Image: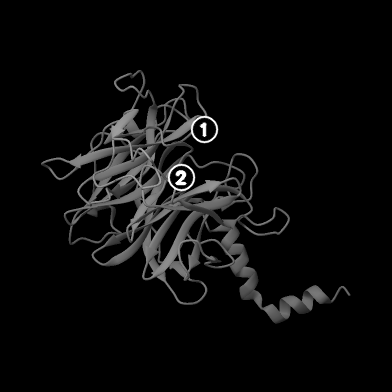
Amino acid sequence: MKFIPVLLFFFLGAGTAVRAQDTCMDNRWSIDMTPVVIDGKYYAVWSGWEDYFEEAEAPEQNLYIAELHFHDRRPYVTLGRRALLSVPEKEWELKRNEKISLLEGPQALYHDGDVFIVYSTRGSWTPYYKMGLLEYRHGRNPLDPSSWVKSESPVFALDPPRSDTSTVSYGAGHASFVKSPDGTQDWICYHSKTSLKPGWGDRKVFLSEFVFGNDGLPVFKAASSQSDRPSGETGPEEWDTGMPVKFSNPIYAGADPWIILENGKYYTCRADGRGIRVTESSYMTESEGPDAVSRIVWTLHDPDSGKWNIRQLWAPELHHIGGKWYIFYTAGRQAKAPFWEQRSGVLVSEDGPFGPYAEHDENPLFTGD
Protein backbone atom coordinates (compact mmCIF):
# COMPACT_ATOMS: atom_id res chain seq x y z
CA MET A 1 0.00 0.00 0.00
CA LYS A 2 3.01 2.33 -0.14
CA PHE A 3 1.88 3.59 -3.55
CA ILE A 4 -1.26 5.30 -2.11
CA PRO A 5 0.40 8.57 -0.96
CA VAL A 6 2.01 8.95 -4.37
CA LEU A 7 -1.30 8.44 -6.16
CA LEU A 8 -3.07 10.84 -3.78
CA PHE A 9 -0.51 13.53 -4.46
CA PHE A 10 -0.88 12.92 -8.20
CA PHE A 11 -4.65 13.31 -8.15
CA LEU A 12 -4.74 16.22 -5.68
CA GLY A 13 -2.11 18.10 -7.65
CA ALA A 14 0.87 20.11 -6.53
CA GLY A 15 -1.31 23.18 -5.98
CA THR A 16 -2.83 21.66 -2.85
CA ALA A 17 0.58 21.06 -1.34
CA VAL A 18 1.72 24.58 -2.20
CA ARG A 19 -1.37 26.10 -0.64
CA ALA A 20 -0.82 24.21 2.62
CA GLN A 21 2.80 25.27 2.71
CA ASP A 22 1.90 28.90 1.99
CA THR A 23 -0.64 28.88 4.79
CA CYS A 24 1.91 27.63 7.31
CA MET A 25 5.03 29.47 6.19
CA ASP A 26 3.97 32.74 4.57
CA ASN A 27 0.78 33.53 6.46
CA ARG A 28 2.14 35.60 9.30
CA TRP A 29 1.05 36.30 12.87
CA SER A 30 -2.38 37.91 12.75
CA ILE A 31 -4.48 38.96 15.72
CA ASP A 32 -7.27 41.40 16.59
CA MET A 33 -8.57 41.75 13.02
CA THR A 34 -11.42 44.22 12.59
CA PRO A 35 -13.33 45.61 9.57
CA VAL A 36 -13.23 49.34 8.78
CA VAL A 37 -15.47 51.18 6.31
CA ILE A 38 -13.78 53.97 4.33
CA ASP A 39 -15.50 55.77 1.47
CA GLY A 40 -18.01 52.94 1.13
CA LYS A 41 -15.39 50.18 0.88
CA TYR A 42 -14.43 47.59 3.47
CA TYR A 43 -10.90 47.16 4.76
CA ALA A 44 -9.43 44.86 7.39
CA VAL A 45 -6.96 46.16 9.97
CA TRP A 46 -5.01 43.83 12.23
CA SER A 47 -1.89 43.41 14.33
CA GLY A 48 0.85 41.38 12.68
CA TRP A 49 4.51 40.66 12.07
CA GLU A 50 6.59 41.66 9.07
CA ASP A 51 8.13 38.20 8.66
CA TYR A 52 7.51 34.61 9.67
CA PHE A 53 9.18 33.57 12.93
CA GLU A 54 8.98 29.86 13.71
CA GLU A 55 8.89 29.15 17.44
CA ALA A 56 9.95 32.72 18.10
CA GLU A 57 8.48 36.15 18.73
CA ALA A 58 8.97 39.03 16.29
CA PRO A 59 11.05 42.03 17.36
CA GLU A 60 8.01 44.28 16.91
CA GLN A 61 4.30 44.06 16.24
CA ASN A 62 2.73 46.38 13.66
CA LEU A 63 -0.65 47.33 12.25
CA TYR A 64 -1.52 46.18 8.73
CA ILE A 65 -4.40 47.01 6.39
CA ALA A 66 -5.87 45.28 3.33
CA GLU A 67 -9.02 45.43 1.25
CA LEU A 68 -11.71 43.14 2.67
CA HIS A 69 -13.94 41.14 0.34
CA PHE A 70 -17.11 39.18 1.11
CA HIS A 71 -18.37 36.27 -1.02
CA ASP A 72 -21.47 34.07 -1.20
CA ARG A 73 -19.50 30.82 -1.14
CA ARG A 74 -16.28 29.60 0.42
CA PRO A 75 -14.00 31.24 1.04
CA TYR A 76 -16.67 33.62 2.36
CA VAL A 77 -14.07 36.27 3.25
CA THR A 78 -10.79 37.14 1.53
CA LEU A 79 -8.17 39.88 1.79
CA GLY A 80 -6.32 41.88 -0.82
CA ARG A 81 -2.60 42.55 -0.64
CA ARG A 82 -1.62 43.76 2.79
CA ALA A 83 0.04 47.14 3.43
CA LEU A 84 1.98 48.26 6.48
CA LEU A 85 -0.18 50.83 8.27
CA SER A 86 1.76 51.80 11.40
CA VAL A 87 4.74 50.72 13.52
CA PRO A 88 5.61 51.42 17.16
CA GLU A 89 7.71 54.58 16.93
CA LYS A 90 6.54 57.14 19.49
CA GLU A 91 8.25 57.20 22.88
CA TRP A 92 5.01 56.09 24.55
CA GLU A 93 4.68 53.14 22.15
CA LEU A 94 8.12 51.65 22.76
CA LYS A 95 8.83 48.82 25.16
CA ARG A 96 10.10 49.38 28.68
CA ASN A 97 11.01 46.17 30.46
CA GLU A 98 8.81 44.31 27.94
CA LYS A 99 10.14 41.89 25.32
CA ILE A 100 8.48 43.58 22.36
CA SER A 101 7.19 46.95 21.17
CA LEU A 102 3.70 46.47 19.83
CA LEU A 103 0.56 47.94 18.33
CA GLU A 104 -2.62 45.85 18.60
CA GLY A 105 -6.36 45.86 19.24
CA PRO A 106 -7.30 48.27 16.40
CA GLN A 107 -10.91 49.45 16.34
CA ALA A 108 -12.77 51.78 13.99
CA LEU A 109 -14.39 54.92 15.37
CA TYR A 110 -16.58 57.15 13.17
CA HIS A 111 -17.73 60.71 13.84
CA ASP A 112 -19.21 63.36 11.53
CA GLY A 113 -17.70 61.71 8.47
CA ASP A 114 -14.28 61.25 10.05
CA VAL A 115 -12.69 57.82 10.32
CA PHE A 116 -10.36 56.94 13.20
CA ILE A 117 -8.54 53.80 14.22
CA VAL A 118 -8.03 53.59 17.96
CA TYR A 119 -5.35 51.04 18.84
CA SER A 120 -3.60 49.68 21.93
CA THR A 121 0.11 49.82 22.69
CA ARG A 122 2.62 48.70 25.33
CA GLY A 123 2.12 45.34 27.00
CA SER A 124 -1.46 44.26 27.69
CA TRP A 125 -0.12 42.42 30.75
CA THR A 126 1.26 45.67 32.25
CA PRO A 127 -0.41 48.66 33.95
CA TYR A 128 1.03 50.83 31.14
CA TYR A 129 -1.28 49.54 28.41
CA LYS A 130 -2.69 52.57 26.60
CA MET A 131 -4.38 53.73 23.41
CA GLY A 132 -3.25 55.77 20.45
CA LEU A 133 -5.17 57.06 17.45
CA LEU A 134 -4.81 57.16 13.67
CA GLU A 135 -6.93 59.70 11.76
CA TYR A 136 -7.72 59.11 8.09
CA ARG A 137 -7.09 61.94 5.61
CA HIS A 138 -10.13 62.06 3.36
CA GLY A 139 -9.73 61.45 -0.35
CA ARG A 140 -6.46 59.58 -0.04
CA ASN A 141 -5.56 55.92 -0.44
CA PRO A 142 -6.32 54.09 2.84
CA LEU A 143 -3.58 51.55 1.98
CA ASP A 144 -0.95 54.29 2.05
CA PRO A 145 0.32 54.94 5.60
CA SER A 146 0.80 58.64 4.74
CA SER A 147 -3.01 58.84 4.48
CA TRP A 148 -3.20 58.49 8.24
CA VAL A 149 -2.12 60.91 10.98
CA LYS A 150 -0.97 59.44 14.29
CA SER A 151 -1.70 61.19 17.58
CA GLU A 152 1.35 62.80 19.19
CA SER A 153 0.40 61.43 22.58
CA PRO A 154 -1.84 58.67 23.91
CA VAL A 155 -5.55 59.39 23.66
CA PHE A 156 -6.34 57.18 26.67
CA ALA A 157 -3.82 56.25 29.35
CA LEU A 158 -4.32 55.23 32.99
CA ASP A 159 -0.71 54.91 34.05
CA PRO A 160 0.02 54.32 37.75
CA PRO A 161 0.06 55.72 40.31
CA ARG A 162 -3.49 56.94 40.17
CA SER A 163 -6.49 57.23 42.47
CA ASP A 164 -8.57 59.90 40.73
CA THR A 165 -11.73 57.76 40.67
CA SER A 166 -13.37 55.51 43.18
CA THR A 167 -12.51 52.59 40.88
CA VAL A 168 -8.74 52.30 40.79
CA SER A 169 -7.60 50.60 37.60
CA TYR A 170 -4.41 50.68 35.61
CA GLY A 171 -3.88 50.71 31.89
CA ALA A 172 -6.65 50.85 29.31
CA GLY A 173 -6.88 48.96 26.06
CA HIS A 174 -8.69 46.94 23.41
CA ALA A 175 -11.78 49.10 23.27
CA SER A 176 -15.05 49.02 21.37
CA PHE A 177 -17.45 51.94 20.89
CA VAL A 178 -21.22 52.14 21.08
CA LYS A 179 -24.08 54.65 21.20
CA SER A 180 -26.53 55.10 24.06
CA PRO A 181 -30.05 53.74 23.53
CA ASP A 182 -31.35 57.13 22.35
CA GLY A 183 -28.33 57.77 20.15
CA THR A 184 -27.26 60.97 21.90
CA GLN A 185 -24.16 59.71 23.74
CA ASP A 186 -20.92 57.95 22.81
CA TRP A 187 -19.51 55.27 25.10
CA ILE A 188 -16.23 53.40 25.22
CA CYS A 189 -16.05 49.82 26.49
CA TYR A 190 -12.49 48.86 27.47
CA HIS A 191 -10.54 46.55 29.72
CA SER A 192 -8.17 47.60 32.46
CA LYS A 193 -5.96 45.93 35.03
CA THR A 194 -6.86 46.12 38.70
CA SER A 195 -3.40 45.14 39.96
CA LEU A 196 0.05 46.62 39.41
CA LYS A 197 1.55 43.15 39.04
CA PRO A 198 2.19 41.96 35.47
CA GLY A 199 -0.35 39.43 34.19
CA TRP A 200 -3.66 38.98 32.44
CA GLY A 201 -5.77 37.41 35.18
CA ASP A 202 -6.88 40.64 36.86
CA ARG A 203 -8.38 42.43 33.86
CA LYS A 204 -11.93 43.77 34.06
CA VAL A 205 -14.30 45.52 31.66
CA PHE A 206 -15.46 49.12 32.11
CA LEU A 207 -17.93 51.45 30.39
CA SER A 208 -17.36 55.20 30.22
CA GLU A 209 -19.05 58.02 28.32
CA PHE A 210 -16.81 60.14 26.08
CA VAL A 211 -17.17 63.22 23.92
CA PHE A 212 -15.55 64.75 20.85
CA GLY A 213 -13.59 67.97 21.35
CA ASN A 214 -13.70 71.13 19.25
CA ASP A 215 -10.94 69.63 17.09
CA GLY A 216 -13.18 66.65 16.30
CA LEU A 217 -11.01 64.19 18.22
CA PRO A 218 -12.35 61.86 20.93
CA VAL A 219 -11.78 62.78 24.58
CA PHE A 220 -11.78 59.73 26.84
CA LYS A 221 -11.89 59.56 30.62
CA ALA A 222 -11.57 56.83 33.21
CA ALA A 223 -14.75 55.08 34.26
CA SER A 224 -16.09 55.74 37.74
CA SER A 225 -17.28 52.97 40.01
CA GLN A 226 -20.75 54.56 39.99
CA SER A 227 -21.83 56.23 36.75
CA ASP A 228 -25.07 57.66 35.41
CA ARG A 229 -26.83 55.25 33.12
CA PRO A 230 -26.64 55.82 29.36
CA SER A 231 -29.27 58.23 28.07
CA GLY A 232 -32.46 56.40 27.18
CA GLU A 233 -31.72 53.28 29.23
CA THR A 234 -34.83 52.60 31.33
CA GLY A 235 -35.70 49.70 33.58
CA PRO A 236 -37.87 46.73 32.67
CA GLU A 237 -41.18 46.02 34.38
CA GLU A 238 -39.68 42.83 35.82
CA TRP A 239 -37.62 44.93 38.23
CA ASP A 240 -39.97 46.05 40.97
CA THR A 241 -37.89 49.08 41.84
CA GLY A 242 -37.16 49.99 38.21
CA MET A 243 -33.67 50.58 36.94
CA PRO A 244 -31.32 52.32 39.42
CA VAL A 245 -30.13 55.77 38.38
CA LYS A 246 -26.50 54.59 38.55
CA PHE A 247 -24.70 51.50 37.30
CA SER A 248 -21.53 49.94 38.70
CA ASN A 249 -18.12 49.56 37.08
CA PRO A 250 -16.51 47.21 36.28
CA ILE A 251 -19.39 45.53 34.48
CA TYR A 252 -17.69 42.11 34.40
CA ALA A 253 -14.33 40.37 34.76
CA GLY A 254 -12.59 39.71 31.46
CA ALA A 255 -10.79 41.33 28.56
CA ASP A 256 -11.09 42.39 24.91
CA PRO A 257 -14.72 43.58 25.26
CA TRP A 258 -16.91 43.88 22.19
CA ILE A 259 -20.32 45.54 22.12
CA ILE A 260 -22.55 46.75 19.27
CA LEU A 261 -26.08 48.15 18.96
CA GLU A 262 -28.19 46.55 16.22
CA ASN A 263 -31.95 46.92 15.72
CA GLY A 264 -32.48 48.24 19.23
CA LYS A 265 -30.53 45.42 20.91
CA TYR A 266 -27.04 45.36 22.42
CA TYR A 267 -24.82 42.43 21.49
CA THR A 268 -21.67 41.51 23.33
CA CYS A 269 -19.19 38.96 22.06
CA ARG A 270 -16.34 37.42 24.05
CA ALA A 271 -14.24 34.33 24.48
CA ASP A 272 -15.67 31.94 27.07
CA GLY A 273 -13.27 29.07 27.66
CA ARG A 274 -12.93 27.31 24.31
CA GLY A 275 -16.07 28.92 22.92
CA ILE A 276 -17.38 32.24 21.66
CA ARG A 277 -20.29 33.62 23.66
CA VAL A 278 -22.81 36.04 22.14
CA THR A 279 -25.27 37.86 24.41
CA GLU A 280 -28.31 39.89 23.39
CA SER A 281 -29.85 42.45 25.75
CA SER A 282 -31.96 45.61 25.66
CA TYR A 283 -29.53 47.20 28.11
CA MET A 284 -25.98 48.31 27.48
CA THR A 285 -25.03 48.10 31.15
CA GLU A 286 -26.97 44.93 31.99
CA SER A 287 -25.88 42.22 29.57
CA GLU A 288 -27.10 39.66 32.09
CA GLY A 289 -30.41 41.46 32.70
CA PRO A 290 -33.88 39.88 32.78
CA ASP A 291 -34.34 39.84 28.99
CA ALA A 292 -30.81 38.70 28.12
CA VAL A 293 -30.19 35.76 25.78
CA SER A 294 -26.69 34.31 26.00
CA ARG A 295 -25.27 31.36 24.07
CA ILE A 296 -22.02 29.73 23.05
CA VAL A 297 -22.26 29.98 19.25
CA TRP A 298 -19.01 28.23 18.23
CA THR A 299 -16.17 26.30 19.83
CA LEU A 300 -12.57 25.58 18.91
CA HIS A 301 -11.80 22.31 17.16
CA ASP A 302 -10.54 19.32 19.09
CA PRO A 303 -6.77 19.51 19.76
CA ASP A 304 -6.31 16.21 17.89
CA SER A 305 -8.22 17.34 14.80
CA GLY A 306 -5.21 18.71 12.95
CA LYS A 307 -7.02 22.01 12.39
CA TRP A 308 -5.31 25.40 12.65
CA ASN A 309 -7.80 26.76 15.22
CA ILE A 310 -7.60 24.45 18.24
CA ARG A 311 -6.29 26.67 21.08
CA GLN A 312 -5.89 30.23 22.40
CA LEU A 313 -9.19 31.83 21.38
CA TRP A 314 -8.69 35.60 21.50
CA ALA A 315 -10.71 38.78 20.99
CA PRO A 316 -13.81 37.72 19.01
CA GLU A 317 -15.97 40.54 17.68
CA LEU A 318 -19.41 40.44 16.07
CA HIS A 319 -20.42 42.46 12.98
CA HIS A 320 -23.65 42.75 10.98
CA ILE A 321 -22.66 43.34 7.34
CA GLY A 322 -24.86 43.04 4.27
CA GLY A 323 -27.57 41.11 6.10
CA LYS A 324 -25.15 38.48 7.44
CA TRP A 325 -23.44 38.17 10.80
CA TYR A 326 -19.67 37.81 10.97
CA ILE A 327 -17.41 36.99 13.91
CA PHE A 328 -13.74 37.88 13.47
CA TYR A 329 -11.52 36.00 15.92
CA THR A 330 -7.97 34.86 16.63
CA ALA A 331 -6.84 31.30 17.38
CA GLY A 332 -3.88 29.00 16.88
CA ARG A 333 -2.17 25.77 17.92
CA GLN A 334 0.25 26.57 20.73
CA ALA A 335 -0.70 25.75 24.28
CA LYS A 336 1.80 28.28 25.65
CA ALA A 337 3.92 31.22 24.50
CA PRO A 338 5.38 32.13 22.11
CA PHE A 339 2.13 31.95 20.17
CA TRP A 340 3.76 32.26 16.75
CA GLU A 341 0.92 30.34 15.04
CA GLN A 342 -1.87 32.73 16.04
CA ARG A 343 -3.99 33.55 12.97
CA SER A 344 -7.23 35.30 12.07
CA GLY A 345 -10.43 33.51 11.13
CA VAL A 346 -14.00 34.55 10.36
CA LEU A 347 -17.32 32.87 11.13
CA VAL A 348 -20.40 33.56 9.00
CA SER A 349 -24.11 33.24 9.83
CA GLU A 350 -27.07 33.93 7.55
CA ASP A 351 -29.58 33.06 10.28
CA GLY A 352 -28.90 35.67 12.93
CA PRO A 353 -26.36 36.57 15.63
CA PHE A 354 -26.73 33.20 17.37
CA GLY A 355 -25.89 31.21 14.26
CA PRO A 356 -25.37 28.55 13.23
CA TYR A 357 -21.99 29.76 12.03
CA ALA A 358 -19.84 28.41 9.22
CA GLU A 359 -16.09 28.95 9.04
CA HIS A 360 -15.05 31.27 6.21
CA ASP A 361 -12.63 28.60 4.92
CA GLU A 362 -10.67 25.56 6.08
CA ASN A 363 -7.58 27.77 6.43
CA PRO A 364 -7.04 31.02 8.32
CA LEU A 365 -7.25 34.28 6.40
CA PHE A 366 -4.13 34.70 4.29
CA THR A 367 -2.30 37.75 5.64
CA GLY A 368 1.04 37.55 3.86
CA ASP A 369 2.06 39.59 0.82
Nearest the eye: 331 or 180: 180
Mark 1 belongs to which amino acid? Trp
Q: Crowdedness of circle 2 by 10 Å Cα count: few (<14), some, many (20+)?
A: some
Q: Are marks 1 and 2 in contact (CB under 8 Å)?
A: no
Q: Residue at x 53, y 31 (%)?
A: 201
Expressed as whole percent of the image width and height from the top left, the position of residue 261 reads: 33, 55
Q: Secondary structure at mark 1?
A: loop
Residue 245 in sight in this render = yes
Residue extending furthest right?
Answer: 1
State the quadrant of the N terminus.
bottom right
Q: Secondary structure at mark 2?
A: loop
Q: Is residue 84 left or right of residue 113?
A: right
Task: Write down the residue under mark 1.
Answer: 200
Q: Crowdedness of circle 1 by 10 Å Cα count: few (<14), some, many (20+)?
A: some
Q: Is residue 324 left or right of residue 114?
A: right
Q: Is residue 324 left or right of residue 53?
A: left
State the quadrant of the C terminus.
bottom left
Label count reads 2
Question: In the figure, 309 relative to 95: above or below?
Answer: below
Expressed as whole percent of the image width and height from the top left, the position of residue 93 reads: 35, 34
Residue extending furthest front?
Answer: 240
Nearest the eye: 48 or 242: 242
Mark 2 belongs to which amino acid? Glu
Nearest the eye: 262 or 78: 262
User: In which quadrant of the rendered view does residue 96 lie?
Assistant: top left
Q: Residue at x 24, y 44 (%)?
A: 231
Q: Give whichever of discs 1 and 2 has the lower sequence position.
A: 1
Q: Which-is-in-front pick, marks 1 and 2? A: 2
Mark seen at residue 107: none
Q: Residue at x 41, y 71 (%)?
A: 70
Mark seen at residue 288: 2
Q: Is residue 123 left or right of residue 229?
A: right
